[in-house]
Amino acid sequence: MSAAPTPPAPPGDQFNELVALMARLRAPDGCPWDQKQTFDTIKPYLLEETYEVLDAIDARDWPELREELGDLLLQPVFFAQMAAEAGHFRIEDCLAAINQKLIRRHPHIFAETVAETAEDVKRNWDQIKAEEKSAKGLAPGTLLSGISRAQPALTEAAQISSKAAGQGFDWPAIEPVFDKLREELAELAEARRGGVASEIEDEFGDILFVMVNLARFLKVDPEQALRKSNAKFRGRFGYVEARLAEMGRPFAESNIEEMELLWQEAKIALKSAR
């Protein structure tokens, strides 16, 4: 009878080991590649690892997600090691800050504040966040100034519309949003007839923004919805490509009718394979 596998060390021990490994790699006698990295050179890896985590979640690939979360966890440790070397802060400071923030921003759990719904929690969170900025002597700015522009445009639009809606600048129900979408589609058609590229771009952007608002009413994350549609298209298009190859017919020798038949076949085949 084989022995039971040894359970991994507690998370605190494992995290301390990761921090020590990163320090060793950055040491004078460490890894040449790790030594030469800077805050700017590591930024792309943070974004790349984030999207790989999202891909694993979309695929419900739990072993892959476990590995990708580890890769993602490495990134803040890497940044914090470089910050420590420069005398800015240490990873302990980051952990203390987020622990304190979670306690401070959840007074309905750790204090006496009452919050019975997710909306109540969000309102309290925003109010506490504003108070924190005021305590730091930061100017309150505009309502939208706290929303980062350095993120996917769909995500930014979702945050903008949500923030505005939270102040009452919103449609009273979902039906007027559909009306607005039809209005914007008509304006795009008119701009297309005019043939001015900048106006076409403007109207197309307006349609996307209305669609983001529609997603908010439907409680759909537009960024994730589009990611899933992209993955679905990849799968179906790959099926069509593979079937054409089986038939010895490259795309150049096929036609849209033939590809459409294979596309419908792909929808059935891939749906049944889930």
Image (tube, rainbow, N blue to C red):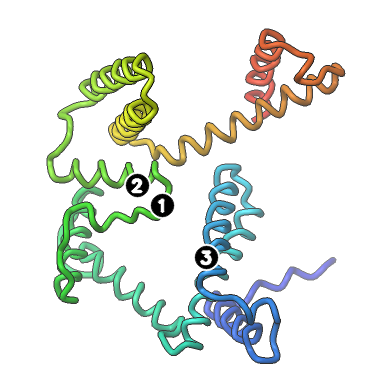
> Residue, x 51% and y 39% (percent of image)?
227
Query: Looking at the image, is 260 positioned above or below residue 201?
Result: above
Q: Which mark is residue 43?
A: 3
Q: Which mark is residue 151?
A: 1
Task: Measure the C-alpha gap from mark 3 to mark 1.
Answer: 13 Å
Q: Confirm whether residue 93 shows in the render.
A: yes
Locate residue 49 relative to residue 186 in the image: left or right.
right
- Name the secondary structure under disc 3: helix
Along the line of sight, the residue nearer the viewer: 50 or 142: 142
Disc 2 and disc 1 in contact, CB within 8 angstroms: yes
Callout 2 crowding tier (Cα within 10 Å): few <14, some 14–19, many ≥20:
some
Residue 266, by quadrant, is top right
Q: Position of residue 246 (x, y in %)?
A: 85, 21
> Residue, x 38% and y 45% (percent of image)?
155
The C terminus sits in image quarter: top right
Query: Of callouts 3 and 2, which one flags the residue occurring earlier in the amino acid sequence?
Result: 3
Along the line of sight, the residue nearer the viewer: 210 or 199: 199
Along the line of sight, the residue nearer the viewer: 58 or 89: 89
Query: Looking at the image, is 79 positioned above or below residue 142?
Result: below
- Name the secondary structure under disc 1: loop
Locate residue 22 relative to residue 206 in the image: left or right.
right
- Name the secondary structure under disc 2: helix
Callout 3 crowding tier (Cα within 10 Å): few <14, some 14–19, many ≥20:
few
> Residue, x 38% and y 19% (percent of image)?
195
Query: Looking at the image, is 69 positioned above or below residue 25?
Result: above
Q: Position of residue 228 (x, y in %)?
A: 53, 36
